[in-house]
Image (tube, rainbow, N blue to C red):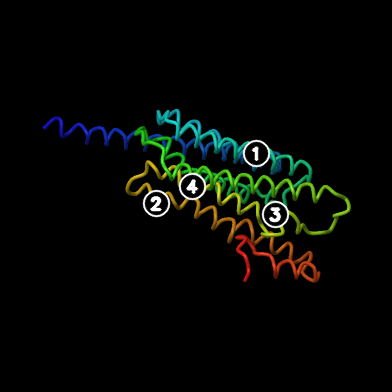
Amino acid sequence: MLNGQIPMLLAALQDLIMGSTLVKCAATDVGIQWAGWALAAALKTEKFYDLAGSGTFILLAHLSRMWGGANHIRQKVQTGLVTAWGLRLGTFLFFRILKDGHDRRFNNVRDSPGTFFVYWTVQAMWVFMTLLPTLLLNSERRDVPLGTRDYVGWALWGFGFATEAIADQQKWIFKSDPNNAGKFIQSGLWAYSRHPNYLGEILQWSGLWLSASSVMAGPQYLSVASPLFVWFLLRYVSGIPMLEKQALRKWGSDPAFQHYTKNTPLLWPFPKF
């Protein structure tokens, strides 16, 4: 009888550890963003908003592995990939805002502490929701041999990472050239998608969920909401709609831009037949 209860006790202990890790990560996430808001509101600046977000991703990935007690190769790789993503994107966005001097998303926000607070709180939700598969994985002490989902997921992440990094660099170089002042980019990866950097972002988090799903069971599979959330946020909320409106206002009457938007996919570079 006791032997039959041992697996149940172990499962209960596992759930307790996983639950406490998620709660601690959520509390840490909110605490960092609210502290960031207090400082940003006092200084009336958004210059470290993205840096704080990417830094929180990295911190929570490592803390969840430490708190969850997981030390398997899958957790190590997953945490390393999140760290690589955060370091690259965080530093890129930070240097970009230093170069530009401001972020247009906050033009009517930085002087309103209440609205600014909402932005920082939404960032906390974005961090936790996007990172959820990694947090679940790092809370799982059960070791499962590496398999197809891991290798496909990591390959997908690598392809997405390269896509986003190359697209960002191409646009940075394009905008840094004085001869391109007032022009829109339509070369490199931007000839195949109007938002290849966002495509890379979606692919990375999709790959990380796929690998993490190797140790998932039951309701944990619902964390597929993570890559779907990233896609929805970029496609319909804060990413593409905002940039498309800005581009339309700036170049909408330009025949070259009209041709570009007509013949270049919005996000997914599907061939036209």
Where is mark 1, residue-wise? 88
Q: Residues within 10 Å of mark 3 (few under 14, many from 20)?
A: many
Which mark is nearer the camera, 2 or 4?
A: 2
Residue in the image at 61% along x and 41% along y:
37
- Front residue (pair 244, 110): 244
Q: Position of residue 217 (x, y in %)?
A: 33, 45
Where is mark 2, residue-wise? 222
Closer to the chain start, of discs 2 and 4, is 4
Q: Quadrant of the N terminus?
A: top left
Residue 224 lies, with reference to residue 6, above or below; the image says below
Closer to the chain start, of discs 2 and 1, is 1
Q: Quadrant of the C terminus?
A: bottom right
Kindly identify the amino acid type of the residue bearing the numbered disc 3. Answer: Leu
Give the CA separation, mark 2 to mark 3: 32 Å
Q: Describe residue 200's horizontal placement relative to residue 107 as left or right.
A: left
Closer to the chain start, of discs 4 and 1, is 1
Kindly identify the amino acid type of the residue bearing the numbered disc 4. Answer: Met
Question: What secondary structure is marked by label 3?
Answer: helix
Where is mark 3, residue-wise? 189
Where is mark 4, residue-wise? 129
Give the number of the disc on residue 137.
Answer: none
Which mark is nearer the camera, 3 or 1?
A: 3
Residue in the image at 57% along x and 40% along y:
33
Q: Residue furthest left?
A: 1
